Image (spheres, grey):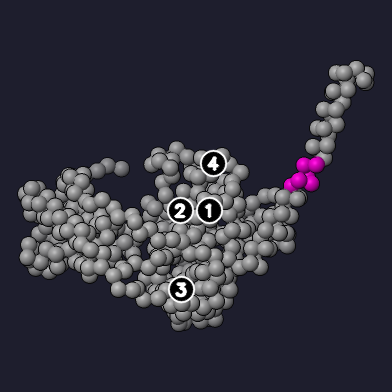
Amino acid sequence: MKIENKDLQITNHSALELFYHGIKSKETKDKYTRTLRRILNDILENVLEGSFEERASQLVNKTKKDPDWGMSVVLALSKKLKERSELPKNDPNYLNPSTIPNYFKPVRKLFEMNNVPLVWRRVMATFPELDNNDKGRAYTRKEIADMLRFGNGAIDRAIVLVAASSGIRVGGFDLTWGDMRPVYRIGDKLAFDITESEQTHAQVVCAILTIYKNTPDEYPGFITPEAYNAIQDYKKEWVQQTGKEPKLQDPLFKKDGVFARKLPPNAVRARIDDILKRAQLRTPLVKGKRRHEIPAMNGFRRFFNKVNKETISKDSHLAALIKKEFMMNHTGLVKLDRNYYQAHIFELIEEYLNAVPNLTISDEERMKVENKKLRNEKSELEKQIPSLVNDAVARIKDELYRDGWKTRP
C-alpha cells in the first residue's frame, strides 16, 4: 500500500463540517452546536456576519490570518463571562464560574479541527476561581425508593435503578440491547456465558453496560441484579409495544409506540424531572436561589460514588480506590492510572459486587443479596475448613516432635 500525491489533497469542507467530524457523540454534537451557535450568533452578533456556518468560517479564517485578533475575541468572551460570574447570585444574569469552561470547549474544538493555533493556557488563566460553596448532595436510598413508587411504568423504574446502581451520566443512557451483558456466578466462578446444564445453578450477580460505545470514552458500567431485573420487566413492555423481540442494535430505552425509536438523553432527564415532581422531591426554587440541593441526574451519580467509596474492599485501599474511580469513568487517582493500571474486568466485577448490597434500593431485594453473599461466604469457609484442620494438625504434630513428646515415624 502506497500513498500517492492525489491522496494528499485537502478536502474542501467548511469550518463547521470539519468541526462536526471531530465529534462522535450525538449528544456532545448537539450540546456543542447550541453553545457555539449562541456564541457566534448572539454574543458575537456585532463582530461576525452572515449565517451560523458563515460566522464559523469567518472566525476560523480571520484567526488564521491574524492570531492576535482571534485571541482578543476569545479573551473578550472570557472577560464578559467573568463579569457575569461576579454578579450577585440572585441576579438573573449571574453565571456560575464552574460553567464558564463549557463555553470554550466548542470554540476550541472548532479551532483544533480547522488547524487554528491558539495559546489556550493564556485563555484558561483568565477564568475566575471556582465557586464551590454550593456543592449540593446525593440522593438518599429512601428518596430513590420514593421515585420508584411514583414512576410511570416499567421504563421509569428501569431508568431510576440503572442511574442509581451505575452512576453513569445522562449521556450514558444512549444504549442498545447489545450493550448489556449479564454476569453469572456458578459456584465460586464468575462467567459471562453459561451452558444449559448450568442455568439452574447460575445466578445473575450484576450486569455490564458498555457506556459511550465506540468512542475514546468507552468504559464498562455496572448495574445491580435489581436494576437488571427491572430491565427484564421493561423488556416485556418493549416487546408488547413493538410486537417483536429487540435486536442487539435496537435502543435499550425507546420512545412510547410501536417503533423502536431511541429515547434521547434529554428525554431521560425529562422523565426523571417528572418523577421528582410527582414524588414531591423537587419543588420550585425560591426567589434568589438558582440551583436545587440535589442535581436531577447527578444526584444518582453522587449516590453511587458515595456508596461505592464507603464500601469495604478486600483489596488495598489504593488499589480499590483506583478501581472505583474507573467505575466513575475517571482517569484514576492520577492521569497515568488508566494507562499503567489496567484492571482485569473480573477484578472490577469483584470490586463492584462488594457494593451491590448497599446499591440495592428495595429492602427486600437488599436482604436477598445480603443473604446470598452470606451463603457464598459460608460455602467458601466450609471448603477451607478441611485444609485449615489439616494445617492445624500438622502444626501440632510438628510441635510435639520438636518438644520430644512424640517420635517421628
Mark nearer the N terminus (4 vs 3): 3
The residues tagged by marks 2 and 4 sit, at their Cα atoms, a distance apart of 17 Å
Question: Badge 1: few (under 14), some or many (20 or more) residues near its Cα, within 10 Å?
Answer: many
What secondary structure is the magenta-colored segment mainly? helix
Helix, strand or loop at label 4? It is helix
Q: Which residue is disc 2 drawn over? A: 328
Which image quadrant: the C terminus?
top right
Which mark is first along the chain, 1 or 2? 1
Q: Earlier in the sequence, mark 3 or mark 1?
A: 3
The N terminus sits in image quarter? top left
Residue position marked by numbered label 4 in the rendering: 317
> Would you say 339 lies left or right of 35 here?
right
Residue at horizontal 16 percent and vertical 49 percent from the top: 116
Tag 4: amino acid: His
Residue linked to disc 3: 281
What is the secondary structure assignment of the residue under circle 2?
Answer: loop
Q: Which residues are magenta?
A: 380-385
The amino acid marked with disc number 2 is Met
Q: CA distance from mark 4 to mark 3?
A: 35 Å
Is 236 included in the stretch rendered in magenta? no
Disc 1 and disc 4: Cα gap in Å?
A: 13 Å
Residue 314, image x and y in percent? 61, 43
Query: Which element is circle 3 on?
Result: loop
Q: Residue at x 54, y 81 (%)?
A: 240
Q: Nearer the viewer, mark 2 or mark 4?
A: 4
Residue type at tag 3: Leu
